[in-house]
Image (cartoon, rainbow, N blue to C red):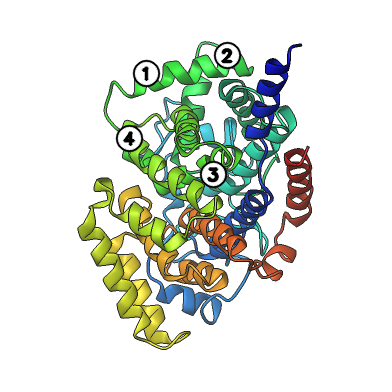
Amino acid sequence: MIASEISTRNLCSAMIKMTEKVIKAREAAIWGMLAADAVAMPVHWYYNPRDIYAGYGGWLTGFVAPNKKHPSSILTLSAVDGSGRTGWNPKSQAVVGNVILHDKLKFWQSNDRSIHYHQGMKAGENTLNAVTAMEFLKTMQRVDPEATKSEEEVRGAVLEGYVKFMTTPGSHNDTYAESFHRSFFKDWASADEKYTTAKDLLKFTENRYKEKTKGKSDSQLVVIGALVPALPWILRNSHKSENDCARSTIDFIKCTHPERALTPFIDIYARLLHAVINGRDLKQEVLQALSHSELGGPRKREIVLRYAENAAAHPAGSTGRLEEYQSAVSDLGMACYIEGALSSMLMLAYAFADDFEGGILMNANCGGENCHRGAALGALLGAHAANKGRDIPQKYKDRLYFKDSVMDLLQQMNNSSKM
């Protein structure tokens, strides 16, 4: 091998290694994603924040198990054979109970209209989207520990692992699966063949995207929950260019969320988290993201700044400040639909850039779609804290239900990054 070839190979090798700072920020983003999701889990989709206070004897201050009853649950109105809340067509196969969520159909079809979406889960336990994101990261680590394989090859392996995980009884403890899971497995189960290999699933999802994007948009897929399965791809590619990171993330989300309208929002978040992991200032990057036309442009940025200023006028920890943020989230968007939910998340990221614990607790106590909004927020706050030399409070690691599994994965990832 001639000297120029050796030099080129060494250069390529250096380009795929992560700096120590990026490794630490990436690790903190994972802890942040999981902690914020688990904190919000017991009050997920509480659309009247006062129900949080009434139901848990005060505002949340850490991990707690969910109550058996949920004051605004519509679990039993959700479709068990696809996305949305259209109910069940007896002529179609119920995906819930038969393909995924194998022992949970009874909760979806119960006469009890107050069943909690995450009934039976433990304090500090993560919801299905966050658990799925962890499964994606485990697959990435197993099949491509040094991040040298093609994105398509890894994408196929992740899809193969996703199908196996979701269709294996007892693989997780959650009762609820949001629309994208149900839609995916409805189409997967009704296909002529049961695609289970990476190669076949890549073809299946490619064809599915082409067909789905020809027809009517499914608004139940254009939601902030899509940011959670996007997170592993941002983390995997955080040492690459911003464009490469965003492109890889979008390419995967097309496999699970065949919606063109979602793409610009995935792009916004991927670039934002990539920038923060690589040491850029969170507040400045949030202001730039808020200026994006998809979110309303400069006018939205000014609205968010005004909300943050109004809240800051109240003493830290006061009821007045809490109520200002609750009102802001309600106005910007507390439901799942991504334009409003992402705006709310960015407002919280800006306001709590230097207060990880305050940010994830505020997110939970604002109610609404706080789990998936929280996962996206927690990743940003965690990465930013690492950049500033601050640790995530240890209790949000020690009391996490899947702590040991997370620590094992992070050790493997960090060892691979330093090779």
Distance Cα–Cα, label 1 vs label 4 = 14 Å
Above or below — where is 178 with respect to 314?
Answer: above
Q: Are marks 3 and 1 in contact (CB under 8 Å)?
A: no
Task: Give the structural element (helix, strand or loop) at label 2.
Answer: helix
Give the percent coordinates (x, y) of residue 358.
52, 74
Left or right of 167, for residue 180: left
Residue beneath label 3, please?
231
**Which residue is found at the position 49% from the left and 67% from the top?**
364
Distance Cα–Cα, label 3 vs label 1 = 24 Å
Distance Cα–Cα, label 4 vs label 2 = 24 Å
Please tell me the numbered disc located at residue 200.
2
Q: Nearer the viewer, mark 3 or mark 1?
A: 3
Distance Cα–Cα, label 4 vs label 3 = 22 Å
Q: Alpha-carbon neighbours of circle 1 within 10 Å: few (<14), some, or many (≥20)?
A: few
Distance Cα–Cα, label 2 vs label 3 = 24 Å
Residue closer to the observer: 113 or 314? 314
Residue closer to the observer: 171 or 348? 348
Give the percent coordinates (x, y) of residue 245.
50, 36
Task: Give the structural element (helix, strand or loop) at label 3.
Answer: helix
Work out whether mark 2 precedes mark 1 in sequence or the reverse, and give the earlier one.
Answer: 2
